[in-house]
Image: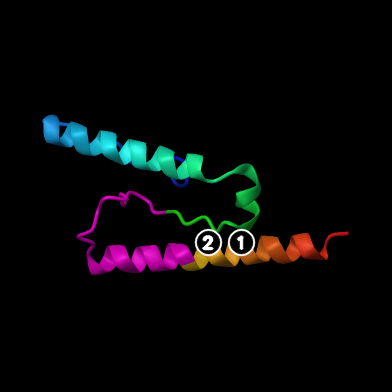
Amino acid sequence: MSSGQQQPRDIENFKDFALSLVDCLMTQIARLHIKPGDWDRTIAINTRDIKTTQFDLSENEKMLLLEEGRQGAEKFFSWHDSQRASP
């Protein structure tokens, strides 16, 4: 599975289906909101399998998101600095 993709979840009832559908729609709305020119100033953070509607995060999940955010910021600023250094 590629970076940033969420793992499929089991759908065993209508509630699971509805939550999966909402999660899918939220992901697509977030992607549509960012215009092509916005990517130059957007820090990508891999949220792994943590959903946008998941609010009951464990301490491990919080630490994972913090680490992913740090790595995303480092990659962004490394790329940004290399773009400024290019003629």
**In terms of depth relative to the viewer, which is nearer, 41 or 1?**
41
Q: Amino acid at mark 2?
A: Gly
Q: Amino acid at mark 1?
A: Phe
In the image, what residue occupies the spot 12% across and 30% down?
Answer: 14
- Disc 1 + disc 2, Cβ < 8 Å: yes
| Residue 73 belongs to the span the image colors magenta | no
| Residue, disc 1 | 76
In the image, what residue occupies the spot 38% across and 63% down?
Answer: 65
Q: Position of residue 27 (x, y in %)?
A: 39, 42
Q: Secondary structure at mark 1?
A: helix
Query: Which residue sits furthest right?
Result: 87
Looking at the rendered structure, the number of numbered marks drawn on it comes to: 2
Residue 15 sits in which quadrant? top left
Q: Is residue 5 visible?
A: no
In the image, what residue occupies the spot 55% across and 59% down?
Answer: 43
33 with respect to 59 (left or right): right
Checking the image for residue 72, the label placed there is 2
| Residue 58 belongs to the span the image colors magenta | yes
Neighbor class of circle 1 (other Cα within 10 Å; few <14, some 14-19, many 20+) is: some
The answer for how far apart the CA atoms under marks 1 and 2 are is 6 Å
Q: Position of residue 49 (x, y in %)?
A: 33, 49
Residue 11 sits in which quadrant? top left
The N terminus, quarter of image: top left
Neighbor class of circle 2 (other Cα within 10 Å; few <14, some 14-19, many 20+) is: some
Q: Position of residue 83 (x, y in %)?
A: 76, 60
Magenta highlight range: 47-69
Q: Position of residue 79 (x, y in %)?
A: 68, 60
Q: What kind of colouring is applied to the model shown?
A: rainbow
Q: Secondary structure at mark 2?
A: helix
In the image, what residue occupies the spot 19% across and 60% down?
Answer: 56
81 with respect to 56 (left or right): right
